[in-house]
Amino acid sequence: MSQQPPADISALRAQLGDRLVIVDDATDPRVSDYVALSDAALRQRTDPEHGRYIAESSKVLRRALAAGHKPRSFFMANKWLESLSDVFAEHPGVPIFAGEDAVLESITGFHLHRGALAAMNRPEPLTLDDVLPSAKRVAILEDIVDHTNLGAIFRSAAALGIDAVLITPRCADPLYRRSIRVSMGAVFQVPWVRLESWPDDVAALRAAGFDIAAMELTAHSQGIDEVAEMHSEKLALILGTEGAGVSAPALEMADRTVMIPMRPGVDSLNVAAASAVAFWELRAR
């Protein structure tokens, strides 16, 4: 890595000092947090192990910071430095890695068209005891591995009155960068818990007074309007993965199954779309 900044950011170097590092070597170990960001399987395995996640885009990283999350470092194209000067001032001592697009792309594995990234420390994980006492509406995401669906569900949850999201052990990571981006940072707003023993964890929800409903088309499914008219004080809604739907063990644990009536010839919605309909129709009133 060169220690001489380009002339057009020399003024920022004067302000930021040695914490601003101009990147010109993709093999430097100081940028290891940003290596191979496009490898989803690798990142889902290593990021939680190292207690980190990546916030992508200036808007998302600002929302992460506003939620109280702590940055490890910033990583961005030179042209984004000035626009984030206020962020740098609020987090003195945090290193800032900057460089030309081609160098950054060789590190991350994709073009940084949103310009700015931040490696963040993961917050301490929440437990059911942290989220259930104050919750009226809970979403349970069973084995949803598509990051786009996961992020879209979190965005709907934040907008439509879901108090907490519970994810099963095999569910994708809500703090993977694509999930965060699709959610527009809603994963920082809605408290979420990774369950440890699914579907046995349903017992804790039932003990806390929740009615357990699974979104699934079965011979005994109730229409969503009918379930909404029950005005459950506390409702936990299970959403299954694309194709397979809610698992048989989870269906056995549920108090009821719920369906969204469809026009003839269509039997289901994408799980993210279905979640938005269900969250609205079954909201606390």
Image: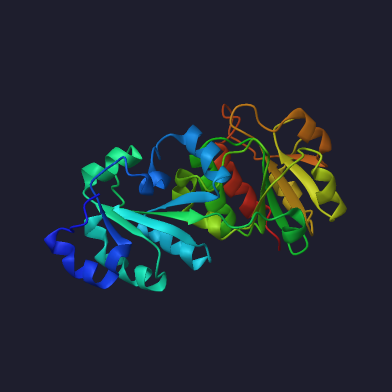
Q: Is residue 3 above or below residue 176?
A: below
Q: Is residue 40 above or below residue 115?
A: above
Give the residue at x 37% y 57%: 74
**Residue 200 occupies quadrant:** top right
Residue placed most toward the observer, 97 or 67: 97
Query: What quarter of the picture does the C terminus occupy?
Result: bottom right
Report how many numbered discs are placed on residues in the image: 0
> Residue 160 placed where, x, y %?
59, 58
Q: Is residue 223 left or right of residue 49?
A: right
Residue placed most toward the observer, 202 or 219: 202
Q: Is residue 100 left or right of residue 156?
A: left
> Residue 92 placed where, x, y %?
39, 70
Q: Is residue 244 above or below residue 281?
A: above
Give the residue at x 21% y 52%: 2
**Residue 231 occupies quadrant:** bottom right
> Residue 282 placed where, x, y %?
69, 53
> Residue 280 placed where, x, y %?
62, 54
Residue farthest along the right direction in this orientation:
207
Q: Is residue 189 above or below residue 37?
A: below
